[in-house]
Image (cartoon, rainbow, N blue to C red):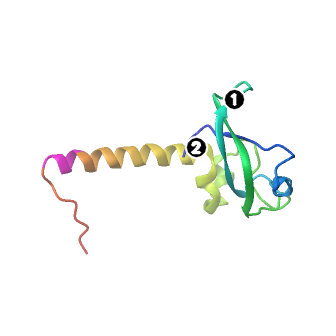
């Protein structure tokens, strides 16, 4: 998980280019390729796609999240999609790091983590 994404470069000559044309905001894709130095600005690396496979399509006309900023009030109406936003995913990464550090500290002090019934 990362706040900044990674750009996938798919040339029209790859065998699975028809899958690229099916991608919309919110779709899930499996990409196989090679990490290469980016020729563009804004990122150091790109993935040069060799195989693209859509594993979960997403109709752009009905998907409520688009590539723009949404208010917290709006996000409360679509709670199941909140983790896909930058704000909520950033909070999740911080929470994960804090929980890991806390568990690591107490384990190093000889404590045992126990979930009681």
Q: Secondary structure at mark 1?
A: loop
* Residue occupying image coordinates x 58% and y 54%: 83
The tag earlier along the polypeptide, 1 or 2, is 1
The local secondary structure at tag 2 comes to: helix
Q: Residues within 10 Å of mark 1 (few under 14, many from 20)?
A: some
The residue nearer to you, when weighing 13 against 28, is 13
| Magenta stretch contains residue 107 | yes
Residue 79 percent location from the top left of the image: 61, 60
Residue nearest the observer in this picture, 81 or 44: 44
Quarter of the rendering containing residue 87: top right
Q: Name the side, left or right, on which 98 lies relative to 16.
A: left
Image location of residue 1, percent across then percent down: 54, 46
Q: Which residues are magenta?
A: 105-109
Q: Residue furthest bottom?
A: 117
Q: Which numbered tag is attached to residue 87?
A: 2
Query: For the image shown, how many numbered marks are present on the structure?
Result: 2
Q: Which mark is residue 64?
A: none
> What is the magenta segment's predominant secondary structure?
helix
Vertical side of 79 occupied by 97: above or below: above
Name the residue at the left extreme: 110
Question: Of the numbered discs in the image, which one, if any, rests on residue 38?
Answer: 1
């Amino acid at each position: 998980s990362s706040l900044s994404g990674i750009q996938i470069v798919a040339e029209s000559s790859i065998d699975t280019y028809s899958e690229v044309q099916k991608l919309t905001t919110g779709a899930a894709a499996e990409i196989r390729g090679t990490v290469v130095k980016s020729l563009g600005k804004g990122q150091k690396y790109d993935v040069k796609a060799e195989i693209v496979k859509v594993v979960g399509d997403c109709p752009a006309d009905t998907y409520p999240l688009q590539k723009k900023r949404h208010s917290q009030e709006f996000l409360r109406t679509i709670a199941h999609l909140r983790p896909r936003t930058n704000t909520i995913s950033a909070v999740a990464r911080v929470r994960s790091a804090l929980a890991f550090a806390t568990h690591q500290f107490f384990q190093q002090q000889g404590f045992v983590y126990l979930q009681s019934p």
